[in-house]
Image (spheres, helix red, strand yellow):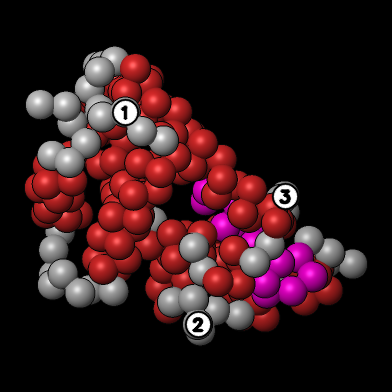
């Protein structure tokens, strides 16, 4: 029987509480120092109670990763729906990707960590993000705004650049920048990147 919590968790969805606490903890102290036991202590629930939802630290991290990837997919689709034209959509979605990573550092770190990417379900979620990206690029190609080519290859090239930028920012390799400054820097990099793809 789960003990009644005197701290943050009282009743309701323990699985959700574990996911939220994991993301918050990783944002604060990083992935390497994260532990499932510390999360259960923070929520004031037994390890056995948490075990019924996640059998290990890696299982919890895998669930966090999948949730983050699904959230990113939805955000890209929402951005695409609000954009004006295929080429504008590509640019806006690229910037949305950067903002997602900068605004959700702990979640982003888990999404692309090696332990989580070893799982089939996590890779499948990542492939869904890639499929959305390729779809957006394919439409821009059909519109004549981007050079013809494999939309998946172009998507992977864009993803690699954007992921590298977010990773550098989260590691503080770009200096102390505000989220707005990172977005402005991303726009400059996108201008350079798209010169090799946009039809002149």
Q: Position of residue 82 (x, y in %)?
A: 32, 20
Magenta region includes residue 131: no
Within 10 Å of the Cα at label 1, are there few (<14), some (14-19), or many (20+) other Cα atoms? some
The image quadrant of residue 64 is: bottom right
Q: Mark 3 points at which residue?
A: 12
Q: Which of marks 1 and 3 is nearer the N terminus?
A: 3
Circle 3: element type: loop
Q: Which of marks 1 and 2 is nearer the N terminus?
A: 2
Q: Mark 2 points at which residue?
A: 32
Within 10 Å of the Cα at label 3, are there few (<14), some (14-19), or many (20+) other Cα atoms? few
Q: Is residue 109 depicted above or below 171 in this figure?
A: above
Please provide the residue range marked out in magenta: 54-71
Please report contact status of discs 1 and 3: CB closer than 8 Å, yes or no: no
Q: Name the residue under label 1.
A: 148
Q: Which residue is drawn at 51% across and 84% down?
A: 33
Q: How far apart are marks 1 and 2 (CA)?
A: 42 Å
178 lies left or right of 90: left
Q: Is residue 32 depicted above or below 148 in this figure?
A: below
Within 10 Å of the Cα at label 2, are there few (<14), some (14-19), or many (20+) other Cα atoms? few
């Amino acid at each position: 029987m789960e003990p009644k919590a005197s701290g943050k968790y009282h009743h309701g969805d323990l699985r959700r509480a574990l996911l939220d606490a994991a993301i918050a903890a990783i944002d604060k102290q990083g992935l390497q120092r994260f532990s499932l036991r510390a999360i259960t202590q923070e929520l004031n629930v037994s390890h056995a109670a948490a075990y019924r939802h996640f059998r290990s630290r890696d299982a919890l991290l895998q669930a966090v990763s999948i949730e983050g990837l699904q959230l990113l997919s939805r955000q890209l689709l929402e951005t695409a729906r609000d954009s004006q034209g295929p080429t504008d959509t590509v640019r806006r979605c690229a910037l949305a990707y950067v903002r997602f990573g900068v605004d959700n550092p702990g979640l982003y770190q888990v999404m692309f960590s090696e332990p989580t990417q070893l799982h089939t379900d996590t890779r499948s979620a990542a492939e869904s993000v890639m499929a959305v990206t390729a779809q957006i690029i394919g439409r821009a190609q059909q519109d004549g705004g981007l050079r013809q080519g494999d939309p998946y290859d172009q998507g992977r090239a864009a993803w690699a650049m954007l992921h590298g930028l977010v990773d550098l920012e989260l590691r503080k390799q770009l200096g102390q920048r505000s989220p707005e400054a990172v977005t402005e820097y991303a726009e400059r990099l996108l201008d350079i990147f798209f010169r090799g793809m946009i039809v002149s």
